[in-house]
């Protein structure tokens, strides 16, 4: 599960790098064509970068919350299984103690001849 999460995060980072390169390239083309000024291109790049950071932080927060929820469920199920096992061991210990007491009561002491 951890590998899947790592691969997903790395894919997201890779996509962000590719997207940034494409944005910079497109803005550079617009500047060369005279469609936008260098200042406008810089402002657009900063806005796109800020939006990307905000989206990344939001996605990271959501992912962390989902991971916490998943592990909480695992912890809860593990605790339930542990509680059930402890109850079974206690029952077996009581049964063994009862059986030992009954066996001790039914054994006749050795006789002397």
Image (cartoon, rainbow, N blue to C red):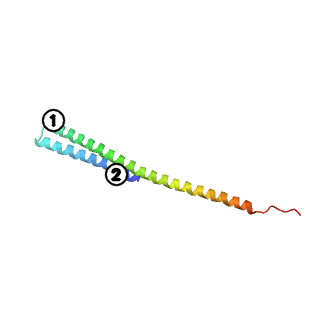
Residue assigned mark 2: 8
Query: For this view, does 90 lie left or right of residue 32?
Result: right
Residue lying at 85% horizontally and 63% vertically, measured from the top left: 111
- Outermost residue on the top side: it is 39
Give the answer, above or below, for where 98 lies relative to 65: below
Element assignment for label 1: helix
At which x and y percent is residue 100? Answer: 69, 59
Give the answer, above or below, for where 72 lies relative to 31: below
Q: Nearer the viewer, mark 1 or mark 2?
A: 2
| Of the pair 29 and 108, the residue shown nearer to us | 108
Residue assigned mark 1: 39
Residue lying at 26% horizontally and 42% vertically, measured from the top left: 54
Residue lying at 14% horizontally and 41% vertically, measured from the top left: 31
At which x and y percent is residue 57? Answer: 30, 43
Query: For this view, does 8 lie left or right of residue 79?
Result: left
- Outermost residue on the right side: it is 113
Element assignment for label 2: helix
At which x and y percent is residue 109? Answer: 80, 61
Q: Residues within 10 Å of mark 1 (few under 14, many from 20)?
A: few
Sequence order check, earlier mark of 1 and 2:
2
Q: Residue 105 carries which label?
A: none
| Of the pair 55 and 94, the residue shown nearer to us | 94
Give the answer, above or below, for where 102 lies relative to 30: below
Alpha carbon distance from label 1 to label 2: 35 Å
């Amino acid at each position: 599960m951890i590998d899947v999460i790592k691969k997903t995060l790395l894919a997201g980072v890779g996509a962000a790098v590719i997207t940034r390169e494409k944005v910079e390239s497109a803005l550079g083309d617009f500047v060369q064509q005279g469609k936008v000024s260098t200042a406008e291109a810089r402002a657009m790049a900063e806005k796109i970068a800020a939006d990307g950071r905000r989206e990344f932080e939001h996605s990271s927060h959501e992912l962390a919350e989902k991971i916490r929820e998943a592990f909480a469920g695992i912890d809860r199920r593990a605790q339930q299984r542990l509680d059930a096992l402890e109850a079974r061991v206690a029952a077996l210990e009581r049964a063994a103690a009862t059986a030992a007491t009954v066996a001790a009561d039914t054994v006749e002491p050795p006789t002397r001849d």
